[in-house]
Amino acid sequence: MTVPMYDHARRYRQLQPELDAAVRRVLEGGRPDWGEEVPGLEREFAAFVGSGFAVGCNSGTAALRLALLALGIGLGDEVITAPNSDAGTASAIHHVGAKPIFVDVEEDTMNLDAGLLEAAITPATRAILPVHLYGHPADMPRNMEIARKHNLFVIEDACLALGSSIANRKAGLWGDIGCFSFASTKHLGGFGSGGICVTDNPQLAERMEQFVGYGQPRARVYDKTAQGQLLLVEGINERLDELRAAMPRVQLPYVPDWTARRIEHAAAYTAAFKNSSIQVPAIRPNCTHTFRNYVIRLEGRDVVQQKLLEAGISVTLAYVPPLHLQPAYARMNLPEGSFPVAEAACERLLCLPISPQLSDAQRDYVIEKLIKAAGGVE
């Protein structure tokens, strides 16, 4: 048996009539830009997560950059975030002229450690950017308390955590702006790239609309009688196009069932590994973990990984090594040992297949081969 990490072809086959119809709708409509799909997705996504507004863009990284620009964060500013995230988290900060400041993470969730935030705050700090890693929400009550105390903005990197929550309040709705991704491997995965920002602040939503479309007001762009351009800000071109908005629109209603399937797989994994040496993901009280990744930790990770690959099971390391040990961030002069919790986690973690398209038989095969590779159960 072979077990892919993701099965995009199977996802397409499951929804082929609807996806094909959406593509035809865009192509036959003759409006690949500034049509009805992007605003339609924005309305539907805002309603889905419970936000007042949503603004589409062309990736999760673009969403983070858009949020930073809308909040006026730029040259000379500092933004506190976690070192064990995807590259887009820190690069978005850097590419608006600000400086990412890394803080170590919690041992159990591997999310930003709120207990270390205040020691990292300086007069240059403008924002906290927690990452809801792997689908488990960061400690947003504590993050927000510290942000309010120090008059800081909060941008949530919720690209891995659509649907996750703390006390029924969803990830992405705690801070000033929440950022999500439509990359193919996410909870709402497109067939290509895409992203979206959510906020309850109409002024921030309007600024994001302006920045993402070259600096133009959205209403003027859609007004066919308007003459010429009106550039209110020095914007960027990181818009979500109509085709890449149409396909997530088709899939959005399926996300609750797909997320339930992820949680079902996670429960089966956790039960199976109960009496083994495998450390399973933590779920804190009052939190909903939506398992974009099912991340175990174990000794001898590299040997186990190779055995699983030889058995036809696709497993990955996300995100290893942590950012401060990547060549791109050597300029920060943060040697090994700077963030010991994040570094230790990265030495032991392994991501198992957990997509909604994973069959029970494939999942059980993963369990069988992993327990054998890790030395069995007690």
Image (cartoon, rainbow, N blue to C red):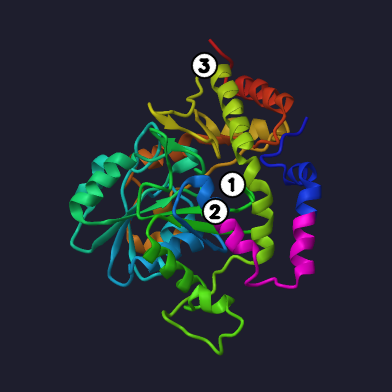
Give neighbour class at mark 2: few <14, some 14-19, many 20+ (Cα, 10 Å): many
Of the numbered discs 1 and 2, the one sitting upstream in the chain is: 2
- Name above or below for residue 334 compared with residue 318: below
- Measure the C-alpha gap from mark 3 to mark 2: 32 Å
Q: Who is closer to the viewer here, 184 or 82?
A: 184
| Quarter of the image with the N terminus in it | top right
Residue 360 lies in the magenta stretch = no
Q: Which mark is residue 44?
A: none
Residue at screen point 22% across, 51% down: 148
Are the residues flagged by discs 1 and 2 in contact, CB closer than 8 Å?
yes
Residue farthest to the top?
Answer: 378
- Measure the C-alpha gap from mark 1 to mark 2: 7 Å
Residue farthest to the front?
Answer: 225
Residue 27 lies in the magenta stretch = yes
- The residue type indicated by label 2 comes to Ser
Q: Which residue is mark 2?
A: 181
- The residue type indicated by label 3 comes to Lys
Tell me where the magenta segment starts and ends, as one range.
21-43
Q: Which residue is mark 3?
A: 274
Residue at screen point 28% across, 66% down: 77
Residue at screen point 25% across, 47% down: 117
- Name above or below for residue 129 compared with residue 279: below
353 sits to left or right of 3: left
- Secondary structure at numbered mark 2: strand
Of the numbered discs 3 and 2, the one sitting upstream in the chain is: 2
- Secondary structure at numbered mark 1: loop
Q: Which residue is mark 1?
A: 186
Residue 267 image position (x, y, % from top left): 56, 23
Residue 353 in view:
no
